[in-house]
Amino acid sequence: MDYQTTITNKETTNKKEKRKERKVYDQKPTPAFVGASWASLFVGTIAFCIGLWNADMLLNEKGYYFTILLFGLFSVISVQKAVRDKLEGIEVTQMYYSISWATTIISILLLIIGLWNADLELSEKGFYAISFMLSIYAAIAVQKNTRDIAYIERNQDINQKDLF
């Protein structure tokens, strides 16, 4: 029996070339997904704000929760932007990337701490937690959809210019 135990340079090169190929994603998010993302963002954010408006709590407590909502939304958008920039080859400093993640985690922890110590019914606490999480998840999806659409349209414009 004669087994081949060595790999030729040509076979090695072909394997490396296959690994280096990057798959190009050129499918836009569907209008249904884009609409669902925006609807989720509006429903979660507006529900959270209506809940605060109708809540029987001091104005400074309402301000605390509203600020956490804004802080959380900004933080997750910043994380998604940093992740996407890295994916597209745009330089992102490790400091900015770390701060984005830290502020996202801090906003969630501040909400948990605030709700844990709040004098609210358990159902109210759950409502604020769920509407907050829906809002920040939807903000990530909206940001991703926006970046996907812009990236694909930019590449289509470049490809069309190359044809002429």
Image (cartoon, rainbow, N blue to C red):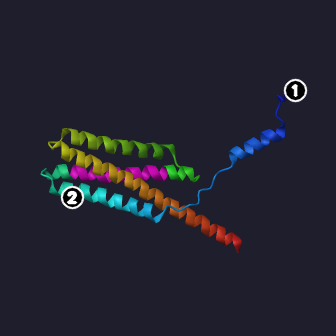
Q: Is residue 107 above or below residue 59?
A: above
From the viewer's perspective, is 3 left or right of 157? right
Whichever of callouts 2 and 1 sits on the residue coming sooner in the sequence is 1
Q: Amino acid at mark 1?
A: Asp
Query: Would residue 76 appear left or right of 94 to someone viewing this image?
Result: left
Q: Which residues are magenta?
A: 63-82
Q: Nearer the viewer, residue 3 or 95?
A: 3
Which mark identifies residue 89?
none
Q: What percent of the width, then of the height, locates residue 100?
A: 42, 46
Residue extending farthest to the right is: 2
Look at the image and say whether residue 71 sits in the magenta stretch: yes
The three-letter code of the residue at mark 2 reads Ile
- Under circle 1, the secondary element is loop
Question: Magenta segment: does it hold 149?
Answer: no
Which image quarter: residue 6?
A: top right
Q: Are marks 2 and 1 in contact (CB under 8 Å)?
A: no
Q: In this view, which residue lies farthest toward the top?
A: 1
Residue 11 at x, y percent in the picture: 80, 40
Name the image quarter holding the C terminus.
Answer: bottom right
The secondary structure type at the circle numbered 2 is helix
Q: Residues within 10 Å of mark 1 (few under 14, many from 20)?
A: few
- Of labels 2 and 1, the one closer to you: 1
Give the image location of residue 112, x and y in percent. 27, 41
Would residue 91 be visible to someone looking at this image? no
- Mark 2 burial class by Cα count in 10 Å: few <14, some 14-19, many 20+: few
Residue bearing mark 1: 2
**From where the camera sits, is residue 19 visible?**
yes
Q: Which residue is mark 2?
A: 50
**Residue at x 22%, y 38% (from the top left corner):** 116
